[in-house]
Image (cartoon, rainbow, N blue to C red):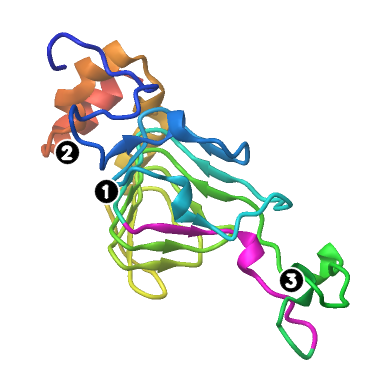
Amino acid sequence: MQDKKLPNPNEIHPIPDYAKEIYIKPTIKNPNIIVGDFSYIADSDFESHVTNFYTWSRDKLIIGKFCQIARGVEFVMNDANHQMNCVTTFPFYTLEGWNMEKPAESDMHFKGNTEIGNDVWIGQNAVILPGVKIGDGAIVGANSVVGSDVAPYTVVVGNPARTIRKRFDDELIGLLLKFKWWDKPIEEINNLISILTSGDLEKVRVELKARE
């Protein structure tokens, strides 16, 4: 805590006099983008990183709390997909002057909502493709292209992104998913910081078990 001031999830600029990092939630205008408290991006405009998202789009982008999104990250939504069950993939229906009605929804490849869990770190210039689900505590490496779901507390890298390891063993992952520190009140999280930032994982394990 700095200057005895509590963190404010509705403050756009969490770093004084620095415009290139923002809490995302208070800047959102699109009702189909839902972002939890304290998730930030290293930029001044989050919605410019969400592409192929039109007024008629039927999917949603859902991001949890305390996510860390680096500069250059792009969330590609379902309307980037073109009709693939016919001769051409050219989207005549979206462009003025062409004699084509909008295809039936069943003809369009739709993967559902894109969902990012809590405390997810997405590295610089990563691309998240439509309908991907990324679990709590996961890490996406820089320049990765994520087209498949990512399990909680898993590290993925590459194009296409592949799992390189779990961050912790299954027991500790289970404890963290049950504990859900991101849902605690601000004052309690402040008191938990010494645990949340400890590299002594056995100490963390003991502390979490004691709080079950």
Residue 101, position in %: x, y?
A: 88, 70
Q: Residues within 10 Å of mark 3 (few under 14, many from 20)?
A: few
Question: Which residue is tagged 2?
Answer: 201
Residue 73, position in %: x, y?
A: 37, 57
Q: Is residue 57 left or right of residue 34?
A: right
Nearest to N terminus: mark 3 or mark 2: 3
Q: CA distance from mark 3 to mark 1?
A: 49 Å
Discs 1, 2 touching: Cβ within 8 Å: yes
Q: Is residue 81 magenta?
A: yes
Question: Which residue is tagged 3?
Answer: 95
Q: Tell me: residue 59, above or below residue 94.
A: above
Residue 123, position in %: x, y?
A: 29, 57
Q: CA distance from mark 3 to mark 2?
A: 55 Å
The quarter of the rendered structure image containing the C terminus is top left
Amino acid carrying label 2: it is Leu
Question: Which residue is tagged 1?
Answer: 168
Amino acid carrying label 1: it is Phe
